Image (spheres, rainbow, N blue to C red):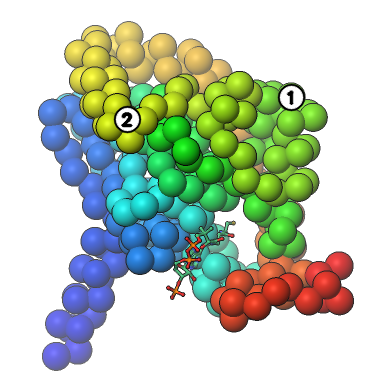
Amino acid sequence: LHLSIRRQRQMCIRDRILSEKKNGILTITINRPEKKNALTREMYQSMADALFSIENDDSIKTVLFRGEGDCFTSGNDISDFAGRKEGDDVNESAAFMRGLINCKVPVVAQVHGMAVGIGTTMLLHCDFIYAETNTRFVLPFINLGLVPEFASSYLLPKMAGHVKASEWLMLGEPFGTEDACQFGLITGSYSAEELTEKVTSVCKKLVAKPSFALMQTKSLLKNDVESTHHYMDIEFDVFGQAMDSEAAREAFDAFLSKRPINPEKFK
Ligand code: COA
């Protein structure tokens, strides 16, 4: 009985990330729509495992990320954040981040609804990002007492300029596809009807390219990987400190209790 309950739980967790290899494409689907695709530690690990599984698999030439339900992802699961004990590691999200940064083949993201927190920062490590026209992006770290992650404090200013990066990271307000396109976060925006068609056609085109040239082109374009890892590690340290702050604990509790933040505890 014990075993079967454990297995059921594992299966349930695994199902929150669906990964499918077909026609040269690894599709990773975030599948927890009832929680707006919030990402738990187990889900990060499943995504990391899926990425590691193609390291030596020459048949896969493209990775596609998408979300089930009405949004891409609402970012890290805040219950997971709140349940973290001082000094706890972040091995699963780190494994996912490293897996994505080191991914040899092109990564396509199909984004819709909301892309919150890591839902936006992970896009900085994708190669083709197509979003539904009304998608909202947000980097809410500051409003949770947290700091940037996934090398976003390094990559965003390079991509969008210091001024825009400051606005996105220090105000933490949502922005739309127009801004995202103008400042280089996404490749393009499409209506809901056109989006899947566009993504499918780009994935097919990528799969038809010669493997060596495709992977080398990606590698040459991503010539800054060492610095990216370096800044990500620096951010991890500060992120850990921020997680232990009173402001962060207050923000997590307020969200989970569905109450406003108490400004006295959010300093
Ligand atoms: N972590 C944990 N639970 C989350 C979550 C998250 N990041 N995002 C959403 N949920 C849960 C909600 O608590 C709610 O659970 P319930 O049905 O048990 O009450 C459910 O998912 C639906 O979310 P809800 O807030 O009702 O949907 P909405 O459409 O009104 O708002 C968001 C969607 C994404 C704007 C809102 O949920 C949100 O702000 N989430 C937190 C985002 C965030 O700060 N992420 C951390 C980034 S570092």
**Residue 169 location (% of width, % of height):** 72, 44
- Above or below, 231 against 159 in this view is below
Please tell me which residue is depicted at 30% across the width and 51% down the height of the picture: 68
In the image: residue 124, left or right of residue 213 = right
Please tell me which residue is depicted at 55% across the width and 68% down the height of the picture: 78
Frontmost residue, 42 versus 70? 70
**Quick check: is the Cβ at mark 2 less than 8 Å away from ligand 1?**
no
**Residue 265 location (% of width, % of height):** 82, 76
Q: Nearer the viewer, mark 1 or mark 2?
A: 2
* Earlier-in-chain disc, 1 versus 2: 1
Task: Give the quadrant of the N terminus.
Answer: bottom left
**Residue 25 location (% of width, % of height):** 21, 31
Please tell me which residue is depicted at 47% across the width and 38% down the height of the picture: 134
Q: Is residue 154 visible?
A: yes
- Above or below, 161 against 258 in this view is above
Frontmost residue, 192 versus 171? 192
Please tell me which residue is depicted at 29% across the width and 44% down the height of the picture: 28
- Above or below, 2 against 52 in this view is below
Pointer 2 residue: 195
Element type where label 1 sits in the image = loop
Pointer 1 residue: 161
* Residue sitting at the far bottom: 1
- CA–CA distance in space, label 1 to label 2: 28 Å
Local packing at callout 2 (Cα closer than 10 Å; few below 14, some 14-19, many 20+) is many
In the image: residue 180, left or right of residue 18 = right
Give the total number of marks visible in the rendering: 2
Q: Amino acid at mark 1?
A: Gly
Q: Is residue 185 visible?
A: no
